Amino acid sequence: MSIATSAEVRPSRILCALTLAMTCVLWLTAWQLALISNPGTPDVVQALAMLVCVFAGCLLALSCRTRIKTLRIDITATGQIRLTHTSRDAFIRDRSHTVVSSEEGEVVQLLRDSTLWSCMLILRVRTGSGKIIVLPILRDSVTAAAFRSACVACQWIAAQNMRPASASFFGESLVD
């Protein structure tokens, strides 16, 4: 049996709905903090908490707009992963907020701290240039068969990347 698989990953509607729900919770929390504040004696901590909630809610609302549009993930039989942006306006932002785009695809390495559950995959991959990309794959992002095969392939890759028994769980040697 080969682990080779390909899947087209669309943005998850469930993840976007949950993000927008969390945005509403943050804004409602800020509103509640504003209602319970006493106008005569301003509480600095309460005002700061309110501003943090509003700011975090705005960031979450904007994050739905800056997600990957459509992505193709190809996994070879040897465990090599290639990410290809398939839509014309596809983009991804790395931690330095620069746009990373590729027409022909980019070979990435699956990191040890990726989350591989039967209902959701959160793939943390490193590009050849060292940039970390977080790719959430929920069941509504791909077809059912593609999700199962990608989950099995990623679990196989993760098992192949495990260190020998003499190393710790985090990939560092026990004796430094």
Image (cartoon, helix red, strand yellow):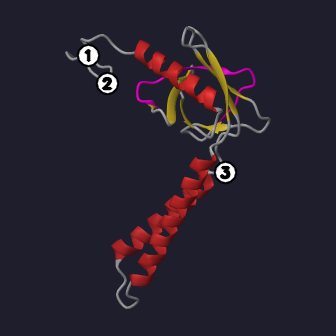
The answer to which image quadrant residue 73 occupies is top right
Q: Depth-wise, is mark 1 or mark 3 nearer the camera?
A: 3
Question: CA gap, disc 1 to disc 3?
Answer: 41 Å
In the image, residue 47 sits, relative to residue 162, either above or below, namely below
Q: Are marks 3 and 2 in contact (CB under 8 Å)?
A: no
Report, in whole angstroms, how far the alpha carbon at label 2 lies from the one at label 1.
Answer: 9 Å
Classify mark 1: helix, strand or loop.
loop
Mark 1 residue type: Ser
Give the Cα separation between the discs numbered 3 and 2: 34 Å
Graded by Cα atoms within 10 Å as few (under 14), some (14 to 19) or many (20 or more), the crowding at tag 1 reads few
Residue that badge 2 annotates: 170
In this rendering, position of residue 36 left or right of residue 174: right
The reply, left or right, for residue 42 in relation to residue 67 is left
Looking at the image, how many numbered discs can be counted on the residues?
3
Looking at the picture, which amino acid does disc 3 mark? Arg
Query: Residue 74: x, y in percent?
Result: 64, 20
* Element class at badge 2: loop
Dot label at residue 143: none
Q: Is residue 85 left or right of residue 176?
A: right
Where is residue 96? Give x, y as percent. Answer: 56, 39
Range of magenta residues: 99-115
Q: According to the image, label 3 marks what residue?
A: 65
Query: Considering only order in the chain, which callout, 3 or 1, is on the residue closer to the N terminus?
Result: 3
Name above or below for residue 95 compared with residue 145. below
Please tell me which of labels 3 and 2 falls first in the chain: 3
Closer to the camera, 137 or 168? 137
Residue position for label 1: 173
